Image (cartoon, rainbow, N blue to C red):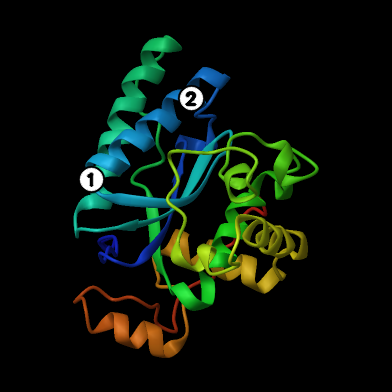
């Protein structure tokens, strides 16, 4: 069966996942992550994509981002992917593919899932057993959300700003969300939607979104469930 085209709609938040081929590491040293961070920052600005959250794991990375144009996100990911593979192959004396095919993404209903998706992304290193707390992992936007450092890659979403009237109030409110964590079902919904490419939201949101595109935005009844590792 032919793979569906990715669902991309400007003005909506998208949860993006890019993995290494056969789950191989895509970051072998801190310099690799620095380069990826720089590429994401430059290309997000160039293609008018606001990045709200990110995490650079060992063999994959996540983004939560809102493109301003229909092709902004695909162009950004293409530019980042190509530049990073050239760097990685040259730096680590290898050749061939690095990515597990094209990146995966889905549209997230803002009011219902955006903050949950931010929490999901920032907790990824904890679920993977890499650190005990999200603040112990330096390669995510968590420290920015908590006011511990300024991260120029990130553009906080309006829902994050609405968490409080002062920086301290916002940081405390977001920290409480992270501390509370996500229910297992919510984690699975977020992960499965991004991997399958189905919109993540209430039925009325999905129905409204379907009216904006000819591409199918939700799955039919047939098909096997997608089983995912906890750290993704």
In 3D space, how far apart are the residues under numbered discs 2 and 1 (Cα atoms)? 20 Å
Classify residue 21 by image quadrant.
top left
Identify the element where label 1 is drawn: loop
Q: Earlier in the sequence, mark 2 or mark 1?
A: 2
- Read off the residue under disc 2: 34
Point out residue 216 in the picture as x, y percentages from the top left corner: 28, 76
**Does 72 sit left or right of 181 as displayed?**
left
Residue found 39% across the figure and 82% down from its top: 220
Query: Front-most of 90 and 141?
Result: 141
Image: 159 above or below 67: below
Identify the element where label 2 is drawn: helix
CA neighbours of label 2 inside 10 A, class few (<14), some (14 to 19), many (20+)? some
In the image, farthest residue toward the right = 132
- Read off the residue under disc 1: 47
Point out residue 16 in the picture as x, y percentages from the top left corner: 42, 53
Residue 180's disc number: none
For the question of whether residue 228 can be seen, the reply is: no
Point out residue 168 in the picture as x, y percentages from the top left corner: 67, 56
In the image, farthest residue toward the front = 166
Query: Front-most of 21 and 150?
Result: 150
**Does 125 sit left or right of 9 as displayed?**
right
Image: 136 above or below 165: above
Residue found 23% across the figure and 84% down from its top: 211
């Amino acid at each position: 069966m032919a793979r569906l085209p990715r669902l991309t709609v400007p003005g909506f938040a998208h949860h993006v996942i890019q993995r290494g081929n056969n789950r191989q590491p895509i970051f072998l040293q801190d310099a690799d992550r620095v380069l990826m961070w720089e590429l994401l920052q430059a290309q997000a600005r160039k293609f008018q994509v606001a990045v709200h959250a990110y995490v650079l794991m060992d063999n994959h990375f996540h983004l939560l981002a809102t493109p301003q144009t229909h092709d902004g996100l695909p162009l950004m990911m293409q530019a980042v992917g190509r530049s990073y593979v050239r760097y990685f192959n040259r730096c680590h004396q290898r050749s061939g593919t690095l990515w597990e095919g094209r990146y995966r993404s889905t549209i997230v209903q803002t009011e219902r899932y955006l903050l949950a998706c931010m929490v999901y992304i920032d907790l990824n290193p904890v679920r993977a057993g890499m650190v005990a707390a999200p603040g112990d992992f330096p390669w995510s936007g968590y420290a920015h959300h908590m006011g511990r450092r300024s991260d120029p890659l990130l553009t906080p979403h309006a829902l994050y700003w609405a968490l409080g009237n002062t920086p301290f109030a916002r940081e405390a409110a977001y920290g409480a969300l992270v501390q509370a964590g996500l229910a297992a079902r919510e984690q699975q919904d977020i992960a499965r939607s991004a991997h399958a490419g189905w919109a993540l939201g209430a039925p009325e949101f999905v129905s409204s979104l379907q009216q904006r595109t000819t591409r199918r935005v939700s799955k039919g009844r047939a098909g096997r469930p997608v089983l995912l590792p906890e750290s993704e």
